[in-house]
Image (cartoon, helix red, strand yellow):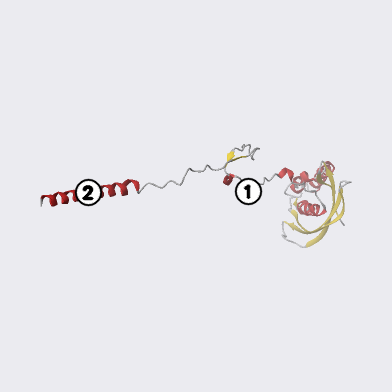
Amino acid sequence: MQTTRKQVGLLIILIGIIIILLIVYFAFWKGQPLSTGPSQPVATTTTTGQLPGGQTTGTTTPSDQPVNYQVYDPNREPTHQINGNDLMKIGMSFAARFGSYSNQSDYGNFTDLKIMMTDNMKSWVDTYITQLKSQSAGNGAYYGVTTQAVTATVSSFDDKAETAAIIVTTKQVANTDKVTGGASSIKKLDLNFKKVNGDWLVDRAYWEK
């Protein structure tokens, strides 16, 4: 009987030890990741040169390298050469402003366009303004003309000779202190262009009769 009690006591102790070992196993060893061998270093490449903005390149991983990296350089774009179509647009804009004026606006339509004129044309404008002012002296009645450019054609264009001629067809409406938006008329403005220091400028302008 005493032997049986000893055996039961030993069995209980053995079971307790097994339970403790299982607890330790699940609590510590089970939570640790299994090793799959030594880790492999990520391959790196070294690029040379210089990125835009002055940033130098260094050691990068393959995923860091740009794909088909292109830099836009406006200095490499070819310079646009002014052609007849361009001068038609310039001529229409010039004609609309040139033909729109009033005796009470101090003839700003002419002075505003001086930036588009040669020195020869500027001198003519100054003389013409003086003439118009003398004719309207003492006359306080308002008179003005509104001009709209309708179409334009290239009469001649010679880039080597640096000369061109544009004819602009306009629609003009006269206004007075008594009548606004009176009868309209169609008039053509002949423009002679001259290339000065790479810029196409109006060298002469006259209305066809």
Q: Amino acid at mark 1?
A: Val
Q: Name the residue tied to disc 2.
A: 14
* Relative image position of residue 38 (x, y in whole percent): 48, 42
Q: From the image, which quarter does the C terminus lie in? A: bottom right
Q: Position of residue 130 (x, y in %)?
A: 81, 44
Q: Which mark is residue 181?
A: none
> In front: 107, or 132?
107
Judge the density around disc 1: few (<14), some (14-19), many (≥20) Cα neighbours within 10 Å: few
Residue lying furthest left: 1
Q: Residue at x 20, y 48 (%)?
A: 13
Give coordinates of residue 144: x percent, y percent: 75, 54
Q: Earlier in the sequence, mark 2 or mark 1?
A: 2
**Dot 1 corresponds to which residue?**
67
Query: Relative to the observer, which residue lies in front, 22 or 182?
Result: 22
Residue at image point 58% right, 45% down: 62
Taking depth in this image into account, of 96 and 58 the one nearest to the observer is 58
Q: Amino acid at mark 2?
A: Leu
Q: Secondary structure at mark 1?
A: loop
Residue 158 versus residue 57: which sits nearer the camera?
57
